[in-house]
Amino acid sequence: MEYTIFGKTDSKISRISFGCWEMGGTQWEHTSDEINTQAIYRALDKGINSFDTAEGYGDGHSEEVLGRALEGKRNEVFVATKVAPKNLRAQDVRKSITNSLKRLRMDHVDLYYIHWPNKDIPLEETMGELLKIQKEGLIRHIGVSNFSISQLKEALSFGRIEAIQNEYSLLQRDIEAEILPFCKNESISVMSYSSIAKGILTGAFHFGGTKLKENDFRAPRRLFLPDHLEKEKELLDAMKEIADRIHIPLSQLAIGWLFSKPGLTSALVGTQSEKHLMENINAVGLTLPPQDLAILDKVSVKVLAAIG
């Protein structure tokens, strides 16, 4: 495992962060708490020290599973959770962090995100309460998630933001234009989520025969629309040619591409499978030839233009 400095702090976090959305159940097809706990143990064994959850993942169930798994290991890990957009009033923020800490069985979290902005609740109110609970030691650092560059700058006008977590992959590159360079200049950590585009970049939907069930939450999403999946095949074909040539899984290639981008701190990857976890971890240290990176960039831009 490789580690990198988190923001302007003296903390070091793993380049792969374990995303705990799936283990909450609800939207994702759930395996079992026991299987997910074993995946967490395996991640720890392989050097992952950064874990990411939220009160909204399974209505707190993800936090409960993670908290039980990390008991006795608090000093070895960097734990992030998030407050839901409906809970951004000052009194609700305090209630949310209190409940999250109970579920996590911890007296503080290392990073506390605003999960999504809420245009109906002033950011100044939310940030004011976050700064108070930070001073009290309930959270060490404040982060934002799914924020635009203007929203990030507004948050910074009230206090230090140590990290931003936005969607970033070969099929979602919006943050490259402004957020990545701004955060690099301001020493704000950038954490990517949906690093393998909710499974598309594993090749499962193009080469593995996987079909979405009608009730799958991904079905109506932009990248999973049938005509968009068809247009995305050009990128998956290019990825497969490279991955087959250097004998690695597609998911590993997708994460390795992310690590080639200046300014990315850690890639969040969620899984309930130890096999997939090991494939993801092996992306750390992967050095892709410039010509392959150029091909992926070019085809990715072309496909993104096609799907809009």
Image (cartoon, rainbow, N blue to C red):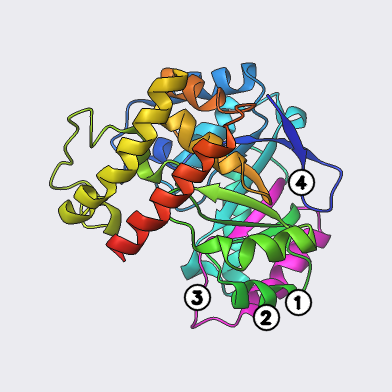
Question: Which amino acid, by three-letter code, is at mark 3?
Answer: Asn
Q: Quadrant of residue 295?
A: top left
**Residue 117 is a magenta residue:** yes
Please tell me whether residue 82 is drawn above or below residue 15 in the rendered image: below
Dot 1 or dot 3: first in sequence order is 3
User: Which mark, by number, is residue 6?
Assistant: 4
Which residue is pictured at 42% across the width and 17% down the height?
275
Q: Position of residue 267 (x, y in %)?
A: 57, 41
Give left or right: position of 57 versus 25: right
Mark 2 or mark 1, which has the lower sequence index? 2
Marks 1/4: CA–CA distance: 20 Å
Say which of marks 1 and 4 sits in front. Answer: 4
The amino acid beneath tag 4 is Phe
Q: Which mark is residue 118?
A: 3
Residue span colored magenta:
109-138
Circle nearer the viewer, 3 or 4: 4
Comparing 187 with 48, the one in front is: 187
Residue 108: % across, % down: 72, 46
Q: Residues within 10 Å of mark 4 (few under 14, many from 20)?
A: some
295 in the magenta segment? no
- Residue beneath disc 2: 124
Q: Residue at left 61%, top 71%?
A: 91
Instruction: Report the mark closest to the observer, 4 or 2.
Output: 4
Q: CA distance from mark 2 to mark 1?
A: 7 Å
Q: Quadrant of residue 79?
A: top right
| Residue type for callout 2 | Glu
> In the figure, 56 relative to 288: above or below?
below
Q: Secondary structure at mark 2?
A: helix
> Which structural element holds mark 1?
loop
Q: Is residue 49 above or below residue 44?
A: below
Percent position of residue 56, x then y: 45, 53
Measure how far apart labels 1 and 3 are at the Cα level. Answer: 16 Å
